[in-house]
Amino acid sequence: MPKDVPVARRVNSNLTPPKKRTNWWLWVGLAIFIAIAYFSITNLISTPKNLSPEPAAAPIVQATPTVPPTDNKVLGHFAYIEAPLDSLEVVAIAADGHEIKLRSAAAIKFKQMLSDAQASGIELLAISGFRSIKEQQQLFFDISRQRNQIPAERAKVSAPPGYSEHHTGYAIDLGDRNSPSTILNPSFDQTAAFRWLEQNAAKYSFELSFPQNNPQGVMYEPWHWRFVGDDNSLSTFYKYSK
Ligand SMILES: [Zn+2]
């Protein structure tokens, strides 16, 4: 029997440690559980404060490649990509000697229009065709400063750089050689050249970009015409329309 005592003690002493270990791990587990629960609750409580800046940032980053039409507008003008230089063709030489260029498809139709107008006794004058974003920068900012105009005022008569139809190589400003005082002036619509354009320009796929009360809110520009006679020009100008 005395031999049994140590055995029993040994059994007891063998059983106790595992029990203690089990309890210890239970407590550790419980502590981890409480910690996780605590952090989840803390996060839930602070969610409204922390989340507000994040969703605002995320959609902007994702939306950049496919900007909705309304975001592509600056002071009433749409964004346009500059025509590749090798797609341009000289259609006329301006009074100051610079070459007036249009994209090939537009150039072909413009030259036909010019000679047909001439055959009808109309002297169309090409004033300005393709314009690079750099050139538009001068036209917009330098003249704004010269004329003491703020951008919003300037944008009524000139597009901000990157937002001019002239960048596309499809737009051209026209005048009447026989009426120099109406050049780049709304009174151009009183000339024989304008009346001829109104009646004939569509035959050559040219249209007025900024008629009176245009939805873009750009000043009436009877001299500014654009080519819409092929897939690329059509989608360039009409991708933004409602
Ligand atoms: Zn123009």
Image (cartoon, grey):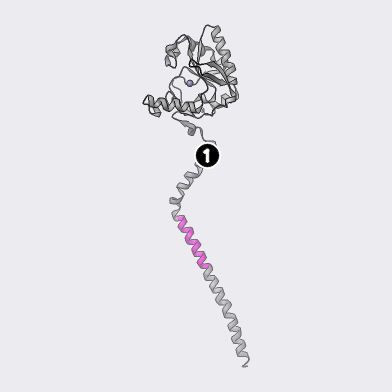
Q: Is mark 1 within 8 Å of ligand 1?
A: no
Query: Image height check: is 22 above or below 72?
Result: below
Q: Residues within 10 Å of mark 1 (few under 14, many from 20)?
A: few
* Residue 56 place in picture, x, y as percent: 47, 44
The residue lying at 51 percent from left, 67 percent from top is: 30
The residue lying at 50 percent from left, 61 percent from top is: 36
Q: Which residue is mark 1?
A: 63
Which residue type carries mark 1?
Ala
Q: Residue furthest bottom?
A: 2
Q: Magenta: predominant secondary structure element?
A: helix
* Residue 167 place in picture, x, y as percent: 52, 26
Is residue 43 part of the magenta span, yes or no?
yes
Q: Which residues are magenta?
A: 29-44
Q: Residue furthest left?
A: 148
Q: Relative to the observer, which residue lies in front, 173 or 20?
A: 173
Q: Relative to the observer, which residue lies in front, 156 or 32?
A: 156
Q: Residue furthest front?
A: 97
Q: Quadrant of the N terminus?
A: bottom right
Q: Relative to the observer, which residue lies in front, 219 or 114?
A: 114
The residue lying at 58 percent from left, 18 percent from top is: 107
Element under label 1? helix
The residue lying at 45 percent from left, 13 percent from top is: 189
* Residue 210 place in picture, x, y as percent: 47, 21
Query: Total label count?
Result: 1
Q: Relative to the observer, which residue lies in front, 135 or 227?
A: 135
* Residue 187 place in picture, x, y as percent: 42, 14
Query: Image height check: is 149 above or below 118?
Result: below
Is residue 107 part of the magenta span, yes or no?
no
